[in-house]
Image: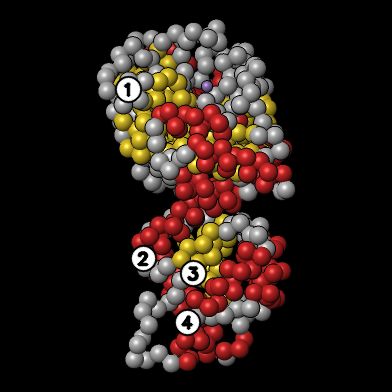
Amino acid sequence: MSVLKQYNFWLITGSQNLYGEEAIRQVNANAADIADALNRSRELPCQIIAMPAVTTPEAITKACKDADYDDSCAGIITWMHTFSPSKMWIAGLSRLQKPLLHFHTQHNREIPWGGIDMDFMNLNQSAHGDREHGFIGARLRLPRKIVAGYYEDTEVRRQIAQWQRCAVGVAVGKTLKVARFGDNMREVAVTEGDKIEAQLRFGWSVNYYGIGDLAAIVHAMPDDEIAEKLKQYDENYLLATDRLDHVRYQARLELGIRRFLEQGGLTAYTTNFEDLHGLEQLPGLASQQLMADGFGFGAEGDWKTAALTRVMKVMAEGLPGGTSFMEDYTYHLEKGNELVLGSHMLEVCPSLAAETPSVEVHALGIGGKNAPARLVFHGGEGPAVAVSLVDMGGRMRMIACDVEAVAPPHAMPNLPTAHIMWRPLPSLSVSAQAWLLSGGAHHTVFTHALTAEHMRDFARMTGLEFVHIGAHTSITELEKELLWNDIAYKFQ
Ligand code: MN
């Protein structure tokens, strides 16, 4: 079921009462026209609803309150068709809880050279009115996205579409529940974090559940459902093992975890190989299947990455390219062809697969449990971004790293895990220096579907520090940015 389609966005057009009723009628007609054109284009993932133009402080405040109150509204888009004195907007905008996009556009693309008169200019003056609106956004220090340009232009629509995806990511976060099956891996720092800060900032509710309670549900899964699940595996994947009892156990795990999550309204979860009491295998194939169905996942108790995987899967809905929990694992340091091999013990989402995954069973050297079944495949090529969320103490930092995924130069027949290779930008050396300086984790969410720009929009909406590593990165500039950010966030 589409998550994006459950949300809409309100176009709130500003004006004032100086121009007369006829002008306001025209403003409303033009706003409806723009909303229709955007909706009909199918370039936006969510519908835009044109609301009646607002011309008084009371109407503006009511529109902002109504938007906040409406669960299906994921954000508002403001546009000043005419001049709308912005002191009228202070009460409404300063209480607004939803993401804001200031759309600086115009109903007419071209000036009607022969026909333009004072009435036309007064009616179509967003160049004027949006400057007043921009000021109040700046004066109120509102986190907002500004999209400037003609509403029929592809680039303008791309920016609105991207912002909508991020706003829905923020909206689903408000009710996102993460199940921690077990605690964090012992002694690991970067997977730790302030769960109260995460709930305050994103709405993510992160709670512990006893592994024994999960085991009870897993072991109660009926045989016929497990048989059906095995049939699905056989249809979708290559069954490259004769140890079917191990595969059957992952089917049991998949069904049991799914049941547990669905019963609790949970859409993300973590596991920890150190904490599997009562389970026979670490969930491998099971977690890969659940990720493919849109659940967030984090290994070793990494609830931040689990929640972020869920949010980014929602943001990426319907876009080409997969999204997965990921780990930077090992390097190929051939001069001039430096590459990262990304993988995990088991849990890489098959949405990244460039070939039909094979179901294999191999022993896992840690955890002391039975050999887990897992999907093995290599990932595809193309631009991607790896995103990490770390707790800096007092605030969270998001780090997004641009990479170019490449086909593995050689087969790796003995590697028993799903994997993907990439070349970080601008180079492995600069990217890795920047990542380590920023404190980026070994766990990330890796996506072909989203870009760093999406994540920047998400960070802006949630008041999150954002560090972007890419072709532009210079270590000396980054060191300054990190220092200045530290100072700036002390004042927040
Ligand atoms: Mn890991």
* Residue at x-position 65% and y-position 60%: 141
Q: Secondary structure at mark 2?
A: loop
Q: Which mark is residue 104?
A: 3
Distance in Å between CA atoms under marks 4 and 2:
18 Å
- Closer to the camera, 36 or 345? 345
* Nearer-N-terminus badge (1/3): 3
Residue 327 in the figure: left or right of residue 357: right
As displayed, is residue 424 above or below residue 359? below
For the residue carrying disc 4, how many other residues have a C-alpha within 10 Å: few (<14), some (14-19), or many (20+)? Answer: many
Percent x, y for residue 416? 38, 15
For the residue carrying disc 1, how many other residues have a C-alpha within 10 Å: few (<14), some (14-19), or many (20+)? Answer: few
- Closer to the camera, 205 or 334? 334
* Residue at x-position 44% and y-position 12%: 246
* Residue at x-position 59% and y-position 74%: 132
Q: Are marks 2 and 3 in contact (CB under 8 Å)?
A: no
Q: Which residue is mark 4?
A: 124
Q: Secondary structure at mark 3?
A: strand
For the residue carrying disc 2, how many other residues have a C-alpha within 10 Å: few (<14), some (14-19), or many (20+)? Answer: few
**Which one is closest to the eye, mark 4 or mark 1?**
1
As displayed, is residue 10 above or below residue 328? below
Which residue type carries mark 4? Asn
Distance in Å between CA atoms under marks 1 and 3:
48 Å
* Nearer-N-terminus badge (4/1): 4
* Nearer-N-terminus badge (4/3): 3
Q: Which residue is mark 2?
A: 153
